[in-house]
Amino acid sequence: MSLSQIARTVKTSPTLALNEKAAILRDKGDPVIHLGGGEPKSKAPMDALLAASAQLNTGEIRYAPADGIPALKKAIIRYTEEFYDRNVKPENVIASGGAKQAIMVALQAILNPQEEVLYPAPYWVSYPEMAKLCGAIGVAALPEDGTFYPRIQDIEMRVGSYTKAVIINSPNNPSGAMYSEEFISDIVQFCEKKDIYLIMDDIYHRLIFDNRKPINCFDYTKKDIERSKIIVINGVSKQYAMTGFRIGWAVANKKLIEAMTNIQGHQTSGPSVLLQKAAVGALNGIQSSVESLRVTLENNRNVLIDQLNSFEGVRVTKPDGTFYCFADFSYYNKSSQKLSEYLIDKVMVLTVPGAEFGMEGYLRISYCGSIKDITDGIERIKWALDPNSPNELYIGDRKLVRDWV
């Protein structure tokens, strides 16, 4: 079969593949624990469900404008004013099928073949593949000090004549690291000096811990929205636990939004009216569910960190936000892929290999599930890896025996 060069080089999403594997194991009746997931287990806000239900009851589920319905744009404008202290117009907003599509359409609008988009490592698994889909090149910037917190020098040394954009995801997937105000200030000013785009992937910006406050990138620019090359990405998936609704958005200058709208119009048209109405309900409704989720995640994080710190040889950096921990398991196996497969095969615990995020030897462990999943999952991992563990482990009425070294 003849496939395009892009089709031959783009890899399967490892996180989506893990979700599929977990579903298959559960269907077989295996007691799998999914610690690789990227979606909160709480319910979508009632305001979102009621808004969708009201629209469904009208029977009017028609095509939507390619850039989103007016009601959703109005809600996003209000959200932008509240969290970014920036007054924007409907022409500065596009609603997409999730934050992922918003990023993808933005990249398609600004990247030419062989141009580069740069992002700190560890990075979200889709950034390199999105660059490939544009015929462009993804460039990872690994902090030279060995931490998850980049400095402006780490970015500067990798920016060249082909660099068109920088993507900043803070708090970060997979590390949970929230970058400092100093770094955000530096990167805004650096990108403006170099006249390159800055894509702020803010999808986790309200899911932060230890009394931290969201950082507003617009605080560090003197340019108005129409002269700025800042693109802010957000959505309802994470903070409102509405992953399946697939509604995200971008805020940027109107010339770029117009180009993104033209591209999206030919790709998918506008997102479903029904799901956009649900997003309006979430954004305009009672916000207590966001804080409730944030508090739950912070507690879950604390439990997970305590569990991981009991391991000999595992190095852990406490996440500042999100619902992921990126732990160094290289003491047990240098290959994160082999280690992840080993844990699935031996104790039916799913994790995501760190190599997929640009850092070998690490595992991404999610704490967005239940406390029981966290404690039972880590207990199984420790049993599988620690040579001093008992010879047997019971999972329900199933007995596992350590028959390996």
Image: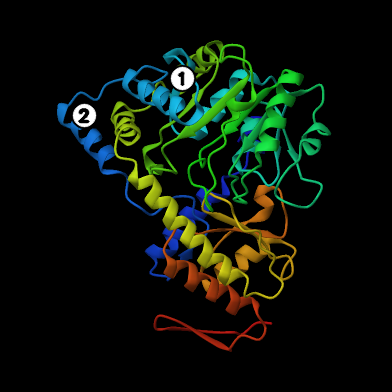
Q: Examine the rendering and report whether any part of residue 2 can be seen.
A: no
Residue at the (76%, 44%) spot, across then down: 142
Specify the amino acid type for callout 2.
Gln
Residue at the (61%, 44%) spot, across then down: 125
| Nearer to the camera, 271 or 134 | 271
Query: In this rendering, is residue 10 above or below 365?
Result: above
Q: Examine the rendering and report whether any part of residue 69 can be seen.
A: yes
Residue at the (69%, 19%) spot, across then down: 112
CB contact under 8 Å: marks 1 and 2: no
Looking at the image, residue 119 sits to the left or right of residue 209; the answer is right
Q: Position of residue 74 (x, y in %)?
A: 36, 21
Give whichever of discs 1 and 2 has the lower sequence position.
2
Q: Position of residue 158 (x, y in %)?
A: 81, 33
Query: In this rendering, is residue 50 above or below 258?
Result: below
Which image quarter: residue 310?
A: bottom right
| Nearer to the camera, 35 or 322 | 322
Quadrant assignment for the N terminus:
top right
Label placed on residue 93: 1
Q: Nearer the viewer, mark 1 or mark 2?
A: 1
Query: In this rendering, is residue 219 above or below 338?
Result: above
Which image quarter: residue 315?
A: bottom right
Secondary structure type for disc 1: strand
| Nearer to the camera, 296 or 95 | 296
Specify the amino acid type for callout 1.
Val
Mark 1, other Cα within 10 Å: few <14 / some 14–19 / many ≥20: many
Question: For the view shown, which residue lies furthest in the bottom direction?
Answer: 391
Q: Position of residue 148 (x, y in %)?
A: 70, 49
Residue at the (26%, 38%) spot, across then down: 47
Question: For the view shown, which residue lies furthest in the front direction?
Answer: 211
Mark 2, other Cα within 10 Å: few <14 / some 14–19 / many ≥20: some
Residue tagged by mark 2? 55
Separation of residues labelled 1 and 2 (CA atoms): 22 Å
